[in-house]
Image (cartoon, helix red, strand yellow):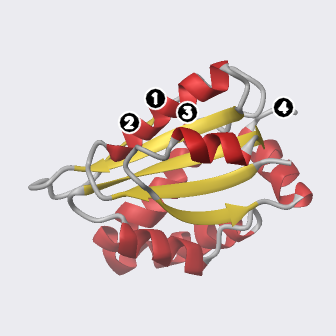
Amino acid sequence: MSSLTVWKFNTADGADNALKKLEGLQKQQIIQVLDAAIVSWPQGRKNPKTYQAMNTTGAGALGGAFWGMLFGLIFFVPLFGLLIGAATGAITGKFTDYGINDGFIKDVQSKVTEGTSALFLLTGQVTVDKVEAAFEDAEKGQLIQSNLSTEQEAKLREDFGAEM
């Protein structure tokens, strides 16, 4: 079973730094990162910068469509106004199928602000104590987590073209 987690950092480069550390841990088989995306919001910028951070050719990757829709829903929809209200409702309803509800979205919106960053991870197996130990001296991230049930994971992979 996979887990979708979001880690918020108090600096614009905190998510990038954390992902680099996770890539090293993945080489040691301490964590299995299936996919990752980053939101970075440097001071002085009107909007955050978002990008898919992992090579998505491997099994389990969600792809740009998923991340683009999620980031659009979280960070950009309020800017579009009421004209796309119905579309927003449809997208929000679709994400509920994957365990990503309004509370999760509002929590991320309120916490990822100018001067911060966030690391969105889809992970498989994790040796939690070893990951925690590796991050003892690193910038601490705040965890906003949405665990996926087996059914939600299957639906997510089906809708976004990822094979198990």
Q: Given the image, on which type of amino acid does mark 3 rest?
A: Leu
Location of residue 38 in the rendering, given as x and y in whole percent from the top left corner: 43, 43
Q: What SS does tag 1 mark?
A: helix
Comes first in the chain, label 2 or label 3? 2
Mark 4 is surrounded, within 10 Å at the Cα level, by few (under 14), some (14 to 19) or many (20 or more) other residues, namely few
Disc 4 designates what residue?
Answer: 163
Q: Position of residue 103 (x, y in %)?
A: 57, 80
SS at circle 2: helix
Give whichever of discs 1 and 4 has the lower sequence position.
Answer: 1
Location of residue 139 in the rendering, given as x and y in whole percent from the top left corner: 37, 49
Residue 16, horizontal then vertical, whole percent: 38, 37
Q: Which residue is mark 1?
A: 20
Secondary element type, mark 3: helix
Tag 3–tag 1 contact (CB < 8 Å)? yes
SS type, badge 4:
loop
Vertical order, 21 against 107 (above or below):
above
State the mark number for residue 22.
3
Instruction: Please tell me how crowded label 3 is: few (under 14), some (14-19), or many (20+) other residues with Cα within 10 Å.
Output: some
**Where, by quadrant of the figure, is residue 149 drawn?**
bottom right
Give the residue pinned by disc 2.
17
Residue 123 left/right relative to 8: right
Proximity of marks 1 and 2: CB atoms separated by less than 8 Å: yes
Q: What's the amino acid at mark 1?
A: Lys
